[in-house]
Amino acid sequence: MSMSEWVQVPSDELGRIVVVSPHFDDAVMGTGYLLAGHPATTVITVFGGRPPVYPETPTEWDALGGFKAGDDIVALRRGEDVAALAELGATPHWLEFSDHQYLDKAEWYQPVDVAPALAAALRHLEPTAVFVPFGLANPDHDLTHRAARLVMDELQDVAWYCYEDAGYCHLPGLLAWRVGALFRSGLWPTPAIVPVALDTERKNRALSAYRSQLPPLMADHMLDARMAAPVQEQYWRLARPPEGWEGLVDVPG
């Protein structure tokens, strides 16, 4: 098999793309060039729902974003999401799970709670390819990844990819840890050449639509530095190993 057959993505595989995003802004940060290059992509935001009750005092993250007690934060952030995705020609699809910051740890969702709703949304959208986060560091990111792994077992006629969680993928060792875990599980993450539109200005305009998120992202996630020195997006195909290559899992590094 030639090198091009290993790394090129068949054009029909990208006919209907769905990007799964933990929070409202993660898809644009991690896959903005992909969205710009493939109009009519749908973005499923897993933690796009209101909490059972907002805290009396806004969380530290929400306070940095300028929210005050009594604000319907999710409604305002959904409005930002619509504006941001419109800049890239994408369509939002929100699931009704709430951000972990609004819940006691004992109330945090489990992958089995999220997977059925995610699977139902994907069946409705009938994608040819699904891009999910590696799920690094943030509990909601990790949960999104693990729920997607459950759905992969159900929807095997779809091409599955991982994208690197913007910001979190730069934390020491975390991306390598997830790649290793996937490798050992029998799914081999392999960087793929996915055609995109490298339109930095358009991606930055979309990011700027998340106005309430800019202050905390700049304070805690170096968003301004990442926007000034744009980091390439990398997509990894998730597939079983080529026949006969399975033994590499047991070869010492």
Image (tube, grey):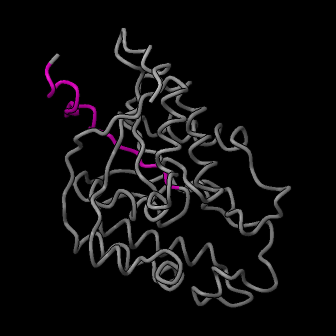
Q: Return the x and y of residue 214 as percentages of the image width and height.
A: 46, 82
Residue sitting farthest toward the front: 252
Instruction: Report the residue at 42% width, 34% height from top.
Output: 126
Quadrant of the frame with the N terminus: top left
The image quadrant that residue 147 belongs to is top right
Q: Return the x and y of residue 55 as percentages of the image width and height.
A: 80, 78
Quadrant of the frame with the C terminus: top left
Instruction: Report the residue at 68% width, 56% height from top.
Output: 97
- Is residue 211 inside the magenta stretch? no
Q: Return the x and y of residue 219 as percentages of the image width and height.
A: 51, 84
- Is residue 16 inside the magenta stretch? yes
Residue sitting farthest toward the top: 244
Q: Is residue 95 left or right of residue 30?
A: right
Instruction: Report the residue at 75% width, 69% height from top.
Output: 102
Q: Is residue 239 left or right of residue 173?
A: left
Nearest the camera: 167 or 22?
167
Instruction: Report the residue at 61% width, 50% height from top.
Output: 142
Nearest the camera: 250 or 133?
250
Nearest the camera: 109 or 244?
244
> Magenta part of the protein: which range?
2-21
The answer to whether 184 is drawn above or below residue 136 in the figure is: above
Tally the numbered discs: 0
Q: Is residue 116 left or right of residue 201?
A: right
The answer to whether 51 is drawn above or below residue 18 in the figure is: below
